[in-house]
Image (cartoon, rainbow, N blue to C red):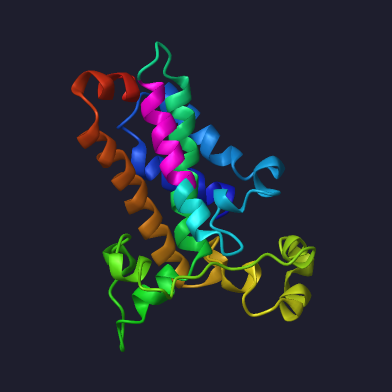
Amino acid sequence: MLEFVHEEMTRAALEGRFSPRALEIVLATNLRQDSWRGLIGHDEYHYDNGAIEESDRYLREQRGFLLAGLLTPGILSSWIAFGRLTHTAQDFYSHTNYVALWLEQYDGTPPPASEIDPLRKDLIEGGRLRSARIYLPLDALYFVPFLRRPVMKLLPADSHGRKDLDSPREGPRFEYARAAAVKRTVYEFELLEKLLTPEMLARFVDQ
């Protein structure tokens, strides 16, 4: 998803749960995943190029780094790990066909986006989950406004530009991806609420 979308979703899910300084670090780390350093050679950060298993593993690793950080005197590493984790979890819904699979169950008018279930096990483990592929340089040129239309005609059907739900310009399915990503971000936070002791949780949220 685009940077402004990640920021809006992360704030919607986490504002009020963290101190302002902690939230800003989580948010900055989330957004840093889309720097050139995070985009080149790191499909696992974004569920790109079919790297579904790799991205799942990356999420587990970041949860582990977060918990390990809470066992040290500092807290910064835990906030950084959570920022990385939330970015990848959010990208799952814009960079895979999860939303399309969820919508398939409705023959007529689907329910509003707010009703999407972000963790349907049968969709995640059913063997039909796919992520779009990146075709360079076309997928990079796709983000240049005046080149978008001609580049779209050249992109393969399974490309990032044709398949991903990165911003509102992608149409009505974007709202389902956004809603699922916000719910997933809340889920990841609430999972920690269940796992951490009250003392560890208080340190983590910095309140």
* In this view, 150 is above or below 42: below
Q: Relative to residue 126, is residue 160 drawn left or right?
A: right
- Is residue 125 at least partly visible in the picture? yes
Image position, residue 198 (x, y; %): 19, 22
Identify the residue at horizontal 36%, vertical 59% (top origin). 180
Q: Position of residue 201 (x, y in %)?
A: 26, 25
Query: x%, y% of residue 71?
Result: 35, 18
Along the line of sight, the residue nearer the viewer: 199 or 8 = 199
Give the side of residue 179 with respect to residue 87, left or right: left
Q: Residue furthest top?
A: 73
Location of residue 179 (image quadrant): bottom left
Residue 162 found in image quarter: bottom right
- Horizontally, is 51 left or right of 113 in the view? right
Q: How many marks?
A: 0
Front residue (pair 95, 58): 58
- The reply to whether residue 20 is visible in this rendering is no
Task: Give x and y (percent) for residue 177.
Answer: 43, 63
Q: Residue at x 49, y 43 (%)?
A: 7
Q: Main secondary structure of the magenta part?
A: helix
Residue 65, magenta (yes or no): yes
Q: Which residues are magenta?
A: 58-70
Q: Quadrant of residue 33?
A: top right
Tell me which residue sits at (55%, 69%) in the image: 170
Quarter of the image that includes the C terminus: top left
The reply to whether the magenta stretch includes residue 7 is no
Of residues 177 and 78, the one drawn nearer to the viewer in this rendering: 78
Give the side of residue 149 with respect to residue 73, left or right. Answer: right
* Figure quadrant of the N terminus: bottom right
